[in-house]
Amino acid sequence: MPADPLDRSAAAPGPERAETGAEQETACQPDRFNRARAAQAATILEDYAEMIGDLIAEFGEARVTDIAHRMGVTHPTATKAVARLRREGLAISRPYRGIFLTDEGEALAGRVRARHRTVVDLLVAVGVPAETAEMDAEGMEHHVSRTTLRAFEDYLRQIDAPPGTESSSQD
């Protein structure tokens, strides 16, 4: 049987052969893709928690139909997301009643909402039109590190501070 041309181990002359940089890079790809998929799953979870919190604030409860409509997804997609929120301990639901966030879910929704506001405020502060800032922040808010978010908040405080009261001024 001929050797598989895609099997790199067949091309190795022996155990002493060192991997090239490209081979090491290829070996790391599954980890990077797994991390990217996990981050995307967390992003979706955060978006649903935030939306449920918004609906509860507006209507007193969140229904799957309303969630699906606001998120622009099908009813089954929203149902799966709510089931995941329940498995993660972030939401509770009862038959013929709405979906409600647990304390942990409310805390998550609050953090996501605050992060969103910070990113929007920063984008507007640097000249991005408000409507564009809202749209752009929706994607960016989930990928901003705590360090970067703190830097955004510090910057926003500095530009909002009255002249002569910057944190860098000496007493």
Image: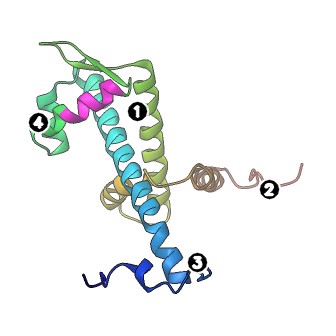
Look at the magenta stretch and give its main secondary structure.
Answer: helix
Q: Nearer the viewer, mark 3 or mark 2?
A: 3
Q: Which residue is mark 2?
A: 168
Element class at badge 2? loop
Question: Real-space Cα distance between discs 2 and 4?
Answer: 53 Å
Taking the spot 22% from the left edge, 24% from the top edge, the residue there is 62
- Assess whether residue 86 is covered by the magenta stretch: yes
Q: Which residues are magenta?
A: 80-87
Q: Which residue is mark 3?
A: 15
**How far from the left and from the top, in percent, is residue 85?**
32, 29
Residue lying farthest to the right in this orientation: 171
**How far from the left and from the top, in percent, is residue 162?**
67, 50
Amino acid of disc 3: Pro
Amino acid of disc 2: Ser
In this view, the residue in front, 99 or 59, is 99
Of callouts 1 and 2, which one flags the residue occurring earlier in the amino acid sequence?
1
